[in-house]
Image: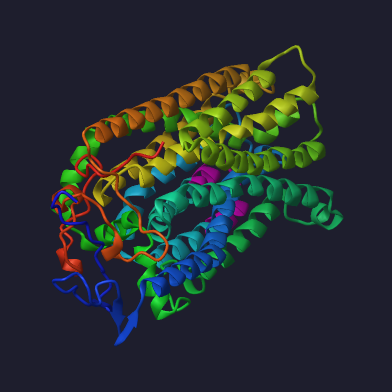
Amino acid sequence: MDGRPSRQLPRVLSSTKEVPPSDSGHGHGDATVTNNSVYSPDEIHRANKRVLLKTDLTVLPLMCVIIMLQYLDKAILSYAALLGLTQDLQLISNEYSWAASIYYFGMLAGLPIWWLLLQRVSLAAVVGGAVSIWGAVAMCHAACHDYSGILAARFFLGFFEAAIVPAFIILVGRAYTKKETISRTAIWYSFNGVALIIGGGVSHGLLTSRSAATASVAIWRQLYLILGGITIFVGLLAAFVVPLDPTRSRLYTERERIAAPYRDTHLAASNIAQETHDYRRMLKDAAEALLDPRLYIIFLGLTLGSIPNGGVTAYSLQLISGFGFPVGQSLLLTLAPGGCQVVSVITFIGVALFTRSRAIGGIVLLAVAIVGAALMYSATVGKAVHMVGYTLLNFGSPAVVALYSFNSAAVGSHGKRVVFAVVAQVAYAAGNIIGPLTFLAQETPVYRTAKIIIIATLCGAALSLALIYGIHTFWNMQRDKAGYPAAVEVQSGQSKNQIKETATPEESGIVQGGAASELQHEPTDFKDKTFRYVL
């Protein structure tokens, strides 16, 4: 071991005490003691598996439903436009585009407030409160009667929905290991596709319902009232029923709560960094983030990748009807792109696992999306081919997941991750603001300029992923050549005393010993030479 002390994983829960190892290295050094009970590494490992299963069966489904409702509540505008909203509100010229874009101005306004609250208020309170309030705001859309009303409603919808992605970035980083992060993020992101399926089905059902058609309330207003009410119910469920923190929830046994933060060394350090609130350290880490070239590449890639998303989300039904399909058929045809989004996420996970690179997975799917956009642009094909192209365009969505996932899996220290996450959200909002404005009213229903921009921005997003892949590969090779050992994650049945690494405490940023107070600080990825960048 070159005489170096091995890196030890600290125990951080105040309810646990670790029995210090004897000078000979024997004794109870591999056991955890709590309430006078000694838990062996095998028991902790079995508890780890139960924690993961319970989290997947409770927290993950709730995340999926919330993401689905977030996408659906903001995308209703496109369905409502086809069902009479633009006529009832007398929207002219590019007013509809601005009504779509202002949602993301609300998101930008809400981001700093929600990030501040997430540092001081429990995840359950933030998520539950935000979801419930945006459900009420969605219902308020039904009371809009003019352009200013829909602008106000859309702004506040974006403001409250802004809480979800940063909250879920923290939640995923807290509940899952680096290896588990990409698949779980992709799973909940895939429910954007489920939202399209449900939105098209509900809208078509209301359109063809005799009672809905004869009601005194317009169909598009009924749509907002129904989905807004469902959102409020889910928000209350998130606040009071489903656990959003395995280290504190009553759903988990004492042993499982002890095991939860130690399923991965990266996960343990991440949890501690979120609890210590060393703001001077966080500012230094934030300054380092500004010197990281990936910050600007991710910003550019997310901005470009979000331009098609913003435009297509706002104009999905207008595009389909512009191909030559009637209103009812257009609503049903949205089921195909929705299903394609789900399939694309599964494909992305498969490609990422096979190539061991989420960047390659994103690039492959962006290539399919570029082909789809080209088919949409072509003037020599029929409406069926245009529809196939529009469906294939939805394969580009998981590229956003790949770029987002680097924020939690390829960035070290909480302060630096916060900067990356905020910049990612600003980029996402900026792209989605620009997207609807590329659909020029005078080009209805063909929107040729928008289609050209979609092709160009998808190519730019693919280039950004390629650059991230190249940078990570180069940095990993540099550390390997320098002889720095890669950090070892806790494997099946291992305790911290069984982790054999040659990293010094200074390299890893962790002081030997078991107490939480002895953790100096989770180092940034630049300072921790044992850190390896995911591809």
Residue 355 vs residue 460, the one in the foreground: 355
Residue 123 vs residue 403, the one in the foreground: 403
The spot of residue 258 in percent (x, y) is 35, 73
Q: Is residue 513 above or below residue 504?
A: below
Quadrant hosting residue 20: bottom left
Is residue 102 in sight in this rendering? no
Quadrant hosting residue 275: bottom left
Residue at 83% across / 54% down in the picture? 214
Is residue 496 in sight in this rendering? yes
The C terminus lies in which quarter of the figure?
Answer: top left
Q: Main secondary structure of the magenta part?
A: helix
Q: Is residue 443 above or below residue 256?
A: above
The spot of residue 180 in percent (x, y) is 47, 52
Residue at 49% across / 70% down in the picture? 50
Residue at far right of view: 210
Q: Is 506 on the left or on the right of 403, as rendered? A: left
Q: Is residue 154 above or below residue 35?
A: above
Q: Residue 61 lies in magenta, yes or no?
A: no
Give the colour scheme shown: rainbow
Q: Residue 145 lies in magenta, yes or no?
A: yes
Residue at 23% across / 35% down in the picture? 290
Q: Is 51 on the left or on the right of 121, as rendered? A: right
Quadrant hosting residue 104: top left
Q: Which residues are magenta?
A: 136-154
Q: Is 41 on the left or on the right of 217, as rendered? A: left
The spot of residue 289 in percent (x, y) is 24, 38
The spot of residue 402 in percent (x, y) is 47, 38
Residue 331 vs residue 223, the one in the foreground: 331
Residue at 25% across / 58% down in the picture? 273
Residue 57 vs residue 528, the one in the foreground: 528
